[in-house]
Amino acid sequence: MTAVKEVTRRPIGHFAERSIAGLVAVVGAGVAFGLLLLLVRTRWSPLQDADHALAEWFNGLVAPHHALVTVLQAVTDLGGRPILIWLVTIAVVGLLIRRQPRLAVYLIITGVGGLILDPSLKTLVGRLRPVVDVPVASAPGNSFPSGHALGSFVAYGALLLVFLPAMAPRWRKPAIVGVGVLVVLVGLTRIALGVHFVSDVLAAWLLGAAWLGVTAYAFRLWRRERGRPVPPLTEGLEPEAGHDIAPAPAEEQVLAHPRSAVAELLVGWVLVFGALYGFGTYVSYHAKGTFLDTLDTDMPRWFAERHTAALTELSWWWSKFGDTHAILLISLVFCPLVLAVWRRWRPVLFVVLAMVGELTLFLASARAVDRPRPAVENLDGQMPTSSFPSGHIAATICVWLAITLIVFPRTDRWWRWVFVGLAVLMPVGVATSRMYRGMHHPTDFMGAILLSALWIGLLYLVIRPNADLAEGNQPAIESEDVDTLDDELARAGRPD
């Protein structure tokens, strides 16, 4: 009987010990932040002198090196709101699809709290940003605390606690170290770029640790109240959810023969490039007097003669649907959702390779052909690449065609035809806007079609993004089995 009591006491004892240690750490971080806040508010001279001296030292170290500034700006963007909001939002949607509402609520509350703390404290303290001799970056608003440092600590820390159970045990410590290094690097870039003092970043880290500790402790109490064991944080918040939140637990390998697939894609890339180079050279320099030459001459002039303020504005917005940022955003939203719903990496690989191949083929063929822009007003001004083929149009075709090829066979719901419509409407709209703006010939559009058809066709044959359906896996969304889309997505996300 005594042994049984001892066994039942152990989880309670471990929880109490971890809770006390956790509370001490959280309180310590909170007290340290409060002290630093007080020193900044009272403008304590030693702290101010140290902050300004370090700001000048970092500025002198970084400002002369433009390549270093570029790298620092790329790293600092990983702590910016657009990246963090995207990560947390995609994670929340994925958790809801995988039927993990408690973890989704935890991410929402933790993330929203971080968003509230940053601007409110900036307004309360009202500290101006550093003034350095050679500014290399700028940021709006006040300085204390650093929003990038706070946001990255809270967002990456919360995501780590949620998704640790989905990792193999041997990868958990490296993941913790990796997230810690990333958070430190983001904070250091804010100092090196001259937009924050050292005390701004230190305060943000302390506040982030305190807030993350409070929310994690609240979640652990939530589990305790429901009679669930409370493991150490090194195992994540919800260890039993590991299988459900793992990206593709039932997929043993992405490709059956990866080496042969790589070889086939490399050979195919060369052949597609050859086709593009041949067609591009012909229409650019050897098609004089042909129908294609007449089309390339007359159509840009026809569009130029019909310019109006309203159409010019509309064409500008529509062409944005095909630029790099829009295509990247579409891919970054679609791929995680595919992974959450269908639990397969192969469709994601298909989309990623579609965009990587399109970009490399476009850049290589544009450089090799080196075709001038149409001899009309180019509304977008001087571009860094040549006219053939159209990168905007090719990227739009590739991304929407790849999405349609994945979604269409996985459901019989009526809305699958929406993707077919988008795969036609979006490229036509982007192509019309690009030609209206005088940036491309009609045969540049043809080149984009050639690039997309050959590359997507090759990828479909080699990668086989829907192979899991042919092999018996049926995570398709079927209208006759469920009544609502939410139920369909939930059923599709269940493990095999």
Image (spheres, helix red, strand yellow):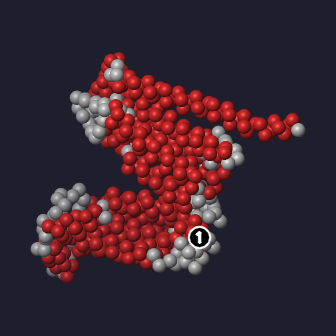
Image x and y of residue 267, in percent: 44, 65
Q: Which residue is drawn at 35% across and 65% down?
A: 395
Q: Residue at x 68, y 37 (%)?
A: 15
- At label 1, which amino acid type do we have? Pro
Left or right: 47 as drawn, with respect to 8: left
Q: Can residue 70 be seen in this view?
A: yes
Q: Is residue 191 visible?
A: no
How many marks on residues? 1
Of residue 227 and residue 207, the one placed in the foreground of this image is: 227
Question: Helix, strand or loop at disc 1?
Answer: loop
Image x and y of residue 400, in percent: 39, 69
Q: Is residue 227 above or below residue 63?
A: below
Q: In this view, does 109 lie above or below 142?
A: below
Residue bearing the label numbered 1: 475
Q: Residue at x 88, y 38 (%)?
A: 1
- Report the residue that reaches farthest toward the left: 305
- Report the residue that reaches farthest toward the right: 1
Q: Quadrant of residue 200?
A: top left
Q: In this view, does 451 lie above or below 336?
A: below
Of residue 403 and residue 374, the one placed in the foreground of this image is: 403
Image x and y of residue 223, in percent: 64, 46
Image x and y of residue 82, in percent: 38, 50
Q: Residue at x 41, y 39 (%)?
A: 117
Of residue 207 and residue 173, the one placed in the foreground of this image is: 207
